[in-house]
Image (tube, rainbow, N blue to C red):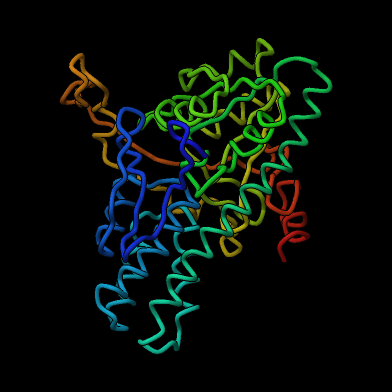
């Protein structure tokens, strides 16, 4: 997708260096950052310079490449893979990508391993682009049906950033929106700000603006009243881990949106590529929910009057805070899952028809 009219991907490999868009600086600054070591890669994931389940996975794949460049020894590469997997615990794509790289490189001699690793990491990226485009085309059908029925602007609510900045291109939840916009369907997006890191306000609104798609930032708790007023035609979100039973783990606050949608008869869709499916865990209580630094709650970042990015304290210094990054939405609250192979119920039977 575009930034200032120029096409970008979120990550690419060039001259033995991984290049990323530093998302901690958006929307105020556009900075391309270079990753040259596996530790650079781990830091970029942990510090959320890259974020979003598919992009985290792709970044970790290139982290394996950088480990090989750094020290082409099996013990170092194996340790690097473990460290990459532990960088963030919730998004299943991270482990999936590292395991895929490890499996591909097993038994490969040291003379060939780097070229094969680069090829595989690029393939993971290219697959994700294809998956997200396909998700968009299937999701477009839903938006088209709403537009045919309503004969007016389609109002869509989304949470966090499941846009192209969370993937390699297109996004998951935003891909149907981009395809509908390109087809000339009038779209308006309600963008949850998504505290505490404001990925909706900082990233989703930013990328929608770059594509000239009408959007409005709202507080995280405003979705319910908008649904009560009939101002939301559908909700669509991404996911960091989806269990085979259809339960969805996504950014904190997703569950509450699903409850409000159910109470107001608003369809609630989850867009996901298949690497986000966890076929092993059977109980959502077993999903490791990341707890991040409480400073993300007590400090807020923005531009001061001189154009300098500053952090300010907004809570009493003596107050405690709990910063859980994700929650789980049970399958019963999800209208449908939108995958690269089609639209299905949030159930193991339907998912297995597509993927097993």
Residue at the right extreme of this rendering: 149
Q: Residue at x 63, y 53 (%)?
A: 131
Residue 115 in percent (x, y) is at 42, 77
Q: Does residue 308 appear to the left or right of 191 in the view shown?
A: left
User: Does residue 83 sit above or below 267 in this rendering?
Assistant: below
Q: Residue at x 46, y 18 (%)?
A: 219
Q: Residue at x 41, y 84 (%)?
A: 112
User: To which quarter of the image does residue 355 belong?
Assistant: bottom right
Q: Does residue 302 appear to the left or right of 27 in the view shown?
A: left
Residue closest to the eye, 43 or 230: 43
Residue at the front extreme of this rendering: 6
Q: Residue at x 44, y 67 (%)?
A: 98
Q: Does residue 300 appear to the left or right of 2 in the view shown?
A: left
Residue 274 in percent (x, y) is at 62, 57
User: Does residue 102 sit above or below 279 in this rendering?
Assistant: below
Quadrant including the C terminus: bottom right
Residue 243 in percent (x, y) is at 60, 54
User: Does residue 106 sit above or below 243 in this rendering?
Assistant: below
User: Does residue 83 sit above or below 339 in this rendering?
Assistant: below
Residue 20 in percent (x, y) is at 36, 49
Q: Does residue 137 appear to the left or right of 276 in the view shown?
A: right
Residue closest to the eye, 174 or 274: 174
């Amino acid at each position: 997708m575009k930034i200032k009219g120029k096409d970008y991907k979120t990550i690419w490999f060039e001259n033995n260096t991984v290049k990323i868009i530093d998302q901690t600086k958006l929307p105020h600054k556009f900075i391309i950052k270079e990753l040259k070591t596996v530790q650079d890669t781990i830091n970029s994931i942990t510090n959320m310079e890259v974020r979003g389940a598919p992009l985290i996975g792709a970044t970790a794949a290139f982290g394996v490449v950088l480990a090989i460049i750094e020290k082409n020894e099996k013990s170092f590469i194996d340790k690097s893979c473990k460290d990459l997997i532990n960088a963030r615990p919730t998004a299943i794509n991270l482990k999936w990508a590292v395991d895929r790289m490890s499996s591909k490189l097993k038994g490969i001699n040291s003379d060939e391993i780097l070229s094969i690793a680069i090829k595989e990491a690029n393939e993971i990226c290219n697959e994700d682009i294809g998956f997200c485009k396909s998700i968009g085309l299937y999701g477009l059908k839903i938006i088209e049906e709403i537009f045919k029925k309503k004969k007016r602007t389609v109002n869509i609510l989304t949470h966090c950033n499941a846009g192209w900045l969370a993937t390699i291109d297109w996004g998951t939840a935003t891909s149907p929106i981009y395809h509908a916009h390109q087809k000339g369907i009038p779209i308006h997006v309600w963008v949850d700000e998504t505290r505490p890191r404001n990925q909706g306000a900082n990233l989703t609104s930013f990328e929608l603006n770059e594509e000239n798609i009408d959007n409005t930032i709202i507080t995280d708790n405003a979705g319910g009243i908008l649904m009560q007023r009939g101002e939301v035609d559908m909700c669509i979100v991404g996911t960091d881990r989806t269990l085979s039973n259809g339960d969805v783990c996504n950014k904190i606050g997703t569950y509450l949106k699903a409850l409000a949608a159910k109470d107001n008869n608003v369809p609630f869709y989850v867009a996901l590529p298949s690497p986000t499916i966890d076929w092993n865990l059977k109980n959502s209580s077993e999903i490791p929910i990341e707890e991040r630094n409480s400073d993300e709650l007590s400090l807020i970042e923005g531009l001061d009057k001189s154009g300098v990015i500053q952090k300010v304290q907004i809570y009493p210094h003596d107050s405690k805070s709990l910063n859980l990054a994700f929650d789980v939405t049970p399958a019963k609250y999800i209208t449908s899952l939108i995958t690269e192979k089609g639209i299905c119920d949030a159930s193991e039977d339907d998912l297995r028809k597509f993927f097993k």
